[in-house]
């Protein structure tokens, strides 16, 4: 993808929601309306916009795209409406409200709870297991792409290339365990009702306003220590993750089709810190020593299906450095990638 550095939040949103050829092809093959559940989070708005823009591009301007959330931010709801997405306010924990959601054969499920899982484990488990049950019952005849996380895997050796879809899971902490619960609930209903589902194990999507790269770049810029104990990560541009989620609608199955979604590289935090130091003209301060294991995912399956990400790691790093230098807006949502005990 040929793209210049975004300089405003609006330009970031435009780039993140720009449909890729693969997303357009998948949308051209789809039939019926779309529902995006949990549209108010970090990824939801741009995913909904990509669906809308892609449908428009293939001549399906009358196909309806519904964005569902509680919408604590009126601004997000207003922006989505202005872009042709029909918003529906719904508490997904309320079965009655879920049952009243609009029909659609294509469902993208992004709802969940992570940060605060340690202080509110009951709410985390309700959001990550009870809500999927409500949704799976409501959309029994739909195709569902259910977002999950690479945290369902155990830590693996940094030289392993990352966990593969067929590897055993080994969650650590309430959040990761509840995400396994989410997967199990969707799998149960897929088997019971023959609902075609794809489980989308995403590992660190980023844009310039949040993500692992921003976390490291900000610390380098401020002269703060960068902990390398969790010494390696995977990342993927949020726009590429959006496109792959749309394409996964074409790969739903029963039992569910499971796929890891992240970039192809196993990335050294130490090397990232050093590179950001160079780009920002700062001396990166390193603390800790790399552990022999990390949460890593192998995305070979996704690359075989969808090709490499459109936005490269080098591009993301350079953009992030420039964004930090310019004092670009952020979402103020650290990833806590350093966490190794599963306590979020």
Image: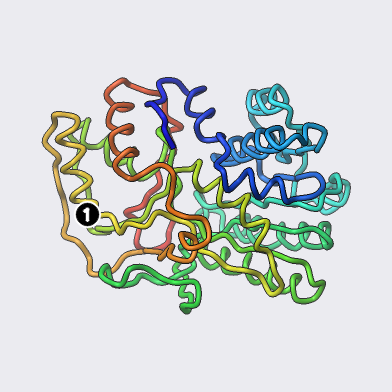
Give residue 180's position: percent from left, percent from top: 57, 69
Q: Residue at x 62, y 67 (%)?
A: 183
Q: Residue at x 72, y 74 (%)?
A: 188
Q: Can you say whether 253 is above or below 113 in the image?
A: below
Q: Quadrant of residue 263?
A: bottom left
Quadrant the C terminus occupies: bottom left
Residue 274: x and y in percent read 16, 43
Q: What count of labels does the image hold?
A: 1
Can you say which quadrant of the picture contains the N terminus? Answer: top left
From the viewer's perspective, is residue 327 above or below residue 279? Answer: above
Q: Is residue 121 left or right of residue 88?
A: left
Q: Position of residue 186 (x, y in %)?
A: 69, 67
User: In which quarter of the view is residue 292 placed?
Assistant: bottom left
Foreground residue among 55 and 331: 55
The answer to whether residue 53 is left or right of residue 30 is left
Left or right placement of residue 113 versus residue 186 in this view: left
Which residue is label 1 attached to? 228
Q: Secondary structure at mark 1?
A: loop
Answer few, some or many: residues within 10 Å of disc 1's Cα (few below 14, many 20 plus, some between 14 and 19). Answer: some
């Amino acid at each position: 993808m040929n793209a210049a550095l975004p300089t405003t939040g609006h330009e970031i949103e435009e780039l993140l929601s720009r449909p890729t050829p693969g997303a357009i092809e998948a949308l051209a093959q789809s039939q019926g309306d779309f529902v995006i559940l949990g549209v108010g989070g970090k990824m939801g708005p741009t995913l909904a916009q990509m669906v809308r823009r892609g449908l428009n591009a293939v001549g399906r301007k009358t196909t309806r795209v519904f964005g569902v959330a509680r919408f604590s931010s009126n601004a997000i709801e207003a922006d989505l409406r202005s872009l042709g997405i029909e918003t529906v306010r719904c508490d997904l924990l309320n079965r009655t409200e879920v049952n009243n959601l609009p029909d659609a054969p294509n469902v993208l499920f992004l709802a969940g709870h992570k940060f605060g899982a340690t202080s509110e484990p009951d709410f985390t488990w309700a959001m990550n297991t009870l809500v999927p049950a409500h949704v799976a019952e409501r959309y029994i005849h739909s195709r569902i792409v259910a977002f999950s996380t690479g945290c369902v895997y155990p830590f693996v050796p940094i030289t392993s290339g990352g966990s593969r879809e067929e590897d055993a899971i080994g969650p650590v902490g309430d959040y990761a365990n509840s995400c396994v619960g989410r997967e199990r609930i969707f799998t149960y209903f897929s088997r019971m009702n023959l609902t075609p589902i794809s489980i989308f194990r995403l590992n660190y999507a980023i844009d310039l306003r949040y993500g692992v790269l921003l976390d490291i770049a900000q610390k380098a810029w401020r002269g703060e220590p960068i902990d390398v104990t969790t010494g390696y990560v995977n990342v993927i541009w949020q726009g590429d993750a959006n496109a792959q989620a749309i394409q996964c609608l074409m790969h739903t199955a029963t039992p569910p089709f499971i796929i890891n979604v992240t970039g192809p590289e196993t990335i050294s935090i130490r090397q990232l810190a050093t590179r950001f130091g160079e780009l920002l003209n700062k001396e990166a301060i390193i603390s800790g020593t790399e552990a022999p294991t990390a949460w890593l995912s192998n995305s070979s399956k996704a690359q075989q299906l969808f090709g490499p990400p459109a936005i490269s790691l080098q591009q993301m790093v350079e953009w992030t450095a420039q964004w930090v230098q310019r004092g670009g807006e952020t979402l103020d949502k650290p990833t806590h990638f350093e966490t190794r005990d599963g306590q979020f």
